Image (tube, rainbow, N blue to C red):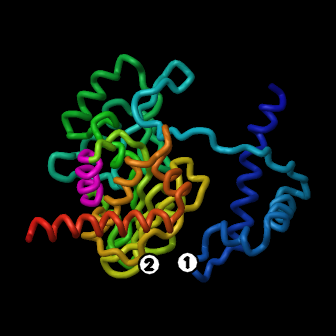
Amino acid sequence: MAEEQKTSKDVLPVVTAIVMVQRDFGNRAERNRARMKYLVHDWGLPRFKAKVEEYLGDRTLADPHPVDSHGYDDHLGWHPQGDGKFYLGVNVENGRIKDDGSLRLKTGLHRLLERFRMPARLTPQQSLLLCDLLQEWKDEILALLGEHGIKTHEEISNARRFAMACPALPTCGLAITESERVMPSVVDELEVELARLGLGAEQFTIRMTGCPNGCARPYTSDIGLVGKAVGKYTILVGGRMLGNRLNVIYKYMVPLREVVKELVPLLVYFKADREPGESLGDFCHRNGIEKLLRFDAEYKRRAESRRAGTHA
């Protein structure tokens, strides 16, 4: 217990020192290189660690434990938070809280916060956690969500649940093309194809950005869509939900209207040749891009032959 208390007490000073190092030595002139990862890459981890220790007052930090990711939890839904109270994870599509047609997310959340005065937390998955809830509030809270068209995680597809997009146009000055504003329509189209193929229950991440800077973490997702020119995206595959493996380029400069069309052969191949329990990203990683592209070409050749035969 004493060791746990000591570790907890030391967290804030160490995090503060890390932020101060980035503040003082990070690239503040080029926005696309302003992240800490570039400083660590340029310096190397030993130099970065030594500077953090210097800011801590010449204290020595122990090497990190060899810990790997063993699971993924987006915390959506109603859960005990360990102190007799509960929290509710609410999906916020692409992180945008707004009223849009029958979905009155902004109004509904305002009413919830005003009525129950609960604290809220933002998550790295662009969702919202409503905390310190009492069990007896559950029915009223869920009813209020439904009244405002705010769906629970059971009411949305897995494709939408695990999708993410950066703001891109018109908010970001670095954006080359759309992301947040078009991602819902991409998911709409993808949901249809997944249902047709019987893959609607699959869990995989799909992330879209309006430029290559990667603010929605597209480079570790099962499917990444990265804006490269106006209305065109690079498709990357082979990451995974845990976020601990980089994906690789599958198709380059694909027009937005053809993105889902280009994914269909990949999904067909996945359904036909996956190993038991294998995820989409793991399937792509195991087979490799050359094999995936060979199947894609053969699938399209056969589809073209069927069309030609029908027309004849």
Which circle's residue, 1 or 2, is located before the other in the chain? Answer: 1
Give the class, few, some or many, for how many residues have Cα within 10 Å of label 2's Cα (few <14, many ≥20): some
Q: What's the residue at 70%, 67% (across, down)?
A: 22
The quadrant holding residue 87 is top left
CB under 8 Å between discs 1 and 2: yes
Query: Camera-side residue: 171 or 197?
Result: 197
Q: Residues within 10 Å of mark 1 (few under 14, many from 20)?
A: few
Residue position for label 2:
174
| Residue range highlighted in magenta | 185-196
Task: Indicate yes or no whether the magenta region holds residue 192.
Answer: yes
Left or right of residue 229, residue 121 in this image: right
Mark 1 to mark 2: distance in Å? Answer: 9 Å
Our reading of the magenta stretch's main secondary structure is: helix
Q: Considering only vertical position in the picture, is 240 above or below 235?
A: above
Which residue type carries mark 2? Leu
Q: Is residue 253 left or right of residue 12?
A: left
In the picture, the quarter occupied by the N terminus is top right
* Residue on which the image places disc 1: 31
Q: Quadrant of residue 175?
A: bottom left
Q: Which mark is residue 231?
A: none
In this picture, residue 161 sits left or right of residue 125: left
Q: Position of residue 6 (x, y in %)?
A: 81, 36
Residue at image position (22%, 46%) is: 104
Is residue 111 something one can see in this rendering? no
Residue at x 28%, y 47% (from the top left corner): 197
Q: Position of residue 10 (x, y in %)?
A: 78, 43
So how many labels did they put on this image? 2
60 relative position to 109: left or right: right
**Element marked by disc 2:** loop
